[in-house]
Amino acid sequence: MAESLENIHIAADPCPHHPEAGAYQPEDWQSETTSIASDLYKGFMENGRRCQALRSSGYFSPADEKQFETREMGHLAALLMNSARANPLFCAPVQDPKRVLDVGTGQGAWAMDVADMFPNAVVRGVDLFPPPGSWIPPNCVFEVDDVLQRWTWRENFALIHLRHGIGAFTPEEWAFLYEQCYDNLEPGGWFEQIEMNIQCECDDESIAADSVLLTWGPRFFAAGEKLGKSLDVTKTMRASIEKAGFVEIHEENKKWPIGPWARDKSLKEAGMVNMQHWLGGMEGYSMYLLTKCGDPMPWSKDEVLVYVAQMRKALTNPRTPAYQYAKRIWARKPFPV
């Protein structure tokens, strides 16, 4: 913690960069950071997994070392699936950004990679839980904060990036978040979002109609509806981005293989990494949702573990050419008329 504290800003309550912070002074931050950070790093335990403690409404994904490793696999899979581009980190035509924001930064891999790519830029990553790394590039700053609070950064961003936001927000919160992104971009700045559909797909009959793989998506969509936070945002994100005022909207849909079954070498490698992302993350992604919002009744922890074991067995079958869709959208904030 001591190695990276200067690059991690911990939000107090109220948050020091919010206007309602009142008499909160800069010198107070240093004295309170250690205790605040300690509480946030502890989080709270739910079914043996550590969860974030900053937002009372909760988020179904854990915030522990195992889940950070899963997010690292997700980041690597995204890089491999975008490896044909000169810049695999984002598609928006941003050449020399001075300020970049990564919303829901997780373990911070994307933010740190962008900071390395653009050493003259200041890259901020914000999330509900402190990132795990002990070394952070000097031009990268992580902030522990709730993006559903009103943003008050003093300067606007050239690029705002968002990934893996599925299940984090209600429809009203999504609308507010897109509004925040729009308002905090400089004129002509770009917003980019990539989300993975959680439904397992197959283009032939290799997956039997009664396979456990085909239950994952519908079961989670139903649980998300019970929770009030849709897990099917790939169907709504473009319309929501357009409604927020963005223009020049670009959309890319790709099949991400789950497993090394593809003939193409690069897709085979990406599929292997994506399968590790699934195998490592399934328990974390499912435990909270199914024990709170399972159908028809909340599941027990043991029931979730059995289900995850069945999913892992089905996914690792070499004769299963499963994939998922990923949607990437990048759009520009218009210049004033």
Image (tube, grey):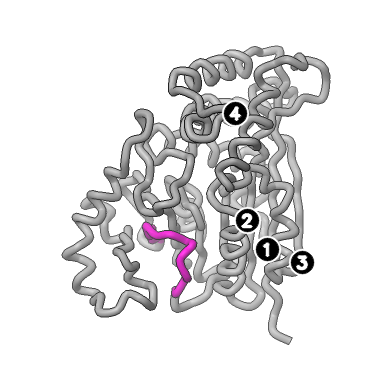
Decide whether residue 145 is among the magenta residues: yes
Say whether residue 323 is left or right of residue 121. Answer: right
Label 4, residues with CA under 10 Å away: few <14, some 14-19, many ≥20: some
Quote the CA–CA distance across marks 2 and 1.
28 Å
Specify which label sits upstream in the sequence, 2 or 3. 2
Q: Which mark is residue 93?
A: 1
Look at 71% across and 71% down and name the residue there. 245
Frontmost of labels 1 and 4 is 4
Specify which label sits upstream in the sequence, 3 or 4. 3
Q: Position of residue 49 (x, y in %)?
A: 37, 32
Q: Amino acid at mark 4?
A: Asp
Q: Are marks 4 and 2 in contact (CB under 8 Å)?
A: no
Quote the CA–CA distance across marks 2 and 3.
23 Å
Look at 38% across and 41% down and name the residue there. 51
- Where disc 4 sits, the SS reads loop
Label 1, residues with CA under 10 Å away: few <14, some 14-19, many ≥20: few
Residue furthest out toward the bottom:
337
Quote the CA–CA distance across marks 4 and 2.
22 Å
Q: How many marks?
A: 4
Q: Which residue is mark 2?
A: 171
Q: Nearer the viewer, residue 103 or 302?
A: 302
Residue furthest out toward the left:
31
Q: Which mark is residue 248?
A: 3
Q: Position of residue 238 (x, y in %)?
A: 73, 56
Label 3, residues with CA under 10 Å away: few <14, some 14-19, many ≥20: few
